């Protein structure tokens, strides 16, 4: 992100309403490589192609905030790889980590990794270091420390069903696992913040949070997320959960979150009420069915419907309800921005 975009984002979080409604998207490997006409494998393995793909996006859509900005991720594999998960990388499909263990009795075998040396974590730091000068020369800065969240990581390490079952049947072991994972994420966030003095934001992605009821959220997610968002003294605390978002929204201010990307199935007005209008909301048209698979007219209508439904346009960053999905064409992104701008 440019410094101007960063300052605009902070203004929006502080409740100021800009003259032109802001637009932003989370972009990463499900969308960016193929949009830039390269394979997903080349995007991960060739730093030059990774940089050029990100640069193409930020220069083609100069008025749109792309977050976290020049993200050197390895799909869902970055953090699980540090724990020792086998990672599967097809040539042009999204990579996946394999389960580390399948038996609850082996929870104790999972130890906290060192993000400075383990898995793909040091590769993330190294790629940003290698391209930091070029990123800054183009007017952008490294602003976010990024990680998958604790429940998300637990589901990769032992399986979603196995983890959620353990929360009810092996509560002590589930908490021990979450403590280990959270300690790692805190260390990982701090490692990134120490490596790049320009970092002023934390970005955590955890859809498994949306699988919990309220009491389970308070027991198995809330405290761990707060520890993570307290890991560094930063201005922007950004949380992504595009599964069920209603359960966590009332507690986001207490956790420290001030920017939330959520499912298109929830209305912005509904989440404004649940959050007490204390959190900036990033959304909210359907990412796959409209932004990726819809026509230009579909995109414009969906954007217009969202904006027309709002009485209060403060603390909103217009986007899709989730990250940018695969296959979104250039013309649909342009239609999204022009529809938002046309509502001024």
Image (tube, rainbow, N blue to C red):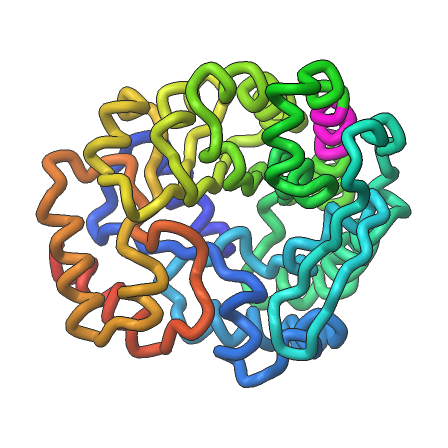
Identity of the residue drawn at 65% across and 40% down: 155
Seen in the image, is 75 located left or right of residue 290? right
Work out which quarter of the rendered image holds the C terminus and state it: bottom left
Q: Main secondary structure of the magenta part?
A: helix
Identity of the residue drawn at 73% across and 72% down: 47
Identity of the residue drawn at 34% across and 35% down: 280
> Can residue 4 be seen in the rendering of this structure?
yes
Seen in the image, is 29 located left or right of residue 171? left
* Residue 134 position (above or below residue 263): below
Identity of the residue drawn at 70% across and 23% down: 174
Seen in the image, is 334 located left or right of residue 179? left
* Residue 13 position (above or below residue 24): above
User: Dividing the picture into quarters, in which one does residue 234 lie?
Assistant: top right
Residue 310 x, y percent position in the rendering? 13, 40
Count up the numbered dots: 0
Q: Is residue 178 magenta?
A: yes
Q: Is residue 273 magenta?
A: no
The residue closer to the viewer here, 294 or 17, is: 294
Seen in the image, is 236 located left or right of residue 294? right
Residue 163 x, y percent position in the rendering? 65, 33
Q: Which residues are magenta?
A: 177-186
The residue closer to the viewer here, 108 or 224, is: 108
Residue 56 x, y percent position in the rendering? 51, 76
> Can residue 145 be seen in the rendering of this structure?
no
Residue 30 x, y percent position in the rendering? 54, 66
């Amino acid at each position: 992100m440019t410094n101007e975009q960063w300052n605009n984002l902070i203004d929006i979080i502080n409740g100021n309403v800009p003259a032109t409604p802001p637009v932003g998207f989370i972009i990463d490997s499900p969308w960016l490589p193929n949009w830039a006409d390269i394979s997903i494998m080349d995007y991960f393995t060739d730093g030059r192609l990774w940089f050029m793909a990100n640069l193409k996006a930020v220069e083609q859509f100069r008025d749109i905030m792309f977050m976290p900005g020049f993200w050197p991720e390895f799909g869902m594999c970055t953090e699980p790889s540090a724990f020792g998960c086998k990672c599967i990388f097809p040539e042009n499909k999204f990579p996946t980590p394999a389960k580390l263990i399948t038996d609850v009795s082996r929870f104790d075998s999972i130890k906290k990794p060192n993000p400075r040396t383990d898995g793909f974590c040091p590769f993330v730091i190294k790629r940003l270091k290698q391209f930091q000068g070029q990123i800054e020369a183009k007017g952008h800065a490294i602003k976010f420390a990024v990680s998958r969240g604790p429940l998300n990581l637990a589901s990769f390490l032992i399986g979603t069903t196995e983890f959620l079952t353990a929360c009810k049947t092996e509560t002590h072991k589930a908490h021990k696992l979450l403590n280990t994972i959270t300690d790692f994420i805190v260390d990982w966030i701090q490692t990134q913040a120490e490596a790049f003095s320009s970092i002023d934001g934390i970005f955590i992605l955890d859809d498994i949070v949306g699988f919990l009821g309220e009491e389970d959220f308070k027991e198995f997610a809330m405290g761990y997320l707060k520890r993570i968002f307290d890991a560094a003294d930063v201005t922007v605390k950004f949380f992504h959960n595009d599964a069920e978002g209603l359960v966590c929204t009332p507690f986001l201010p207490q956790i420290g979150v001030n920017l939330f990307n959520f499912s298109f199935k929830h209305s912005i007005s509904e989440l404004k009420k649940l959050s007490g209008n204390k959190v900036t909301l990033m959304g909210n048209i359907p990412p796959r069915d409209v932004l990726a698979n819809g026509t230009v007219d579909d995109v414009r209508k969906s954007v217009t419907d969202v904006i027309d439904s709002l009485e209060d346009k403060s603390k909103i960053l217009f986007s899709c309800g989730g990250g940018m999905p695969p296959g979104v064409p250039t013309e649909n992104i342009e239609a999204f921005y022009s529809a938002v701008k046309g509502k001024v």
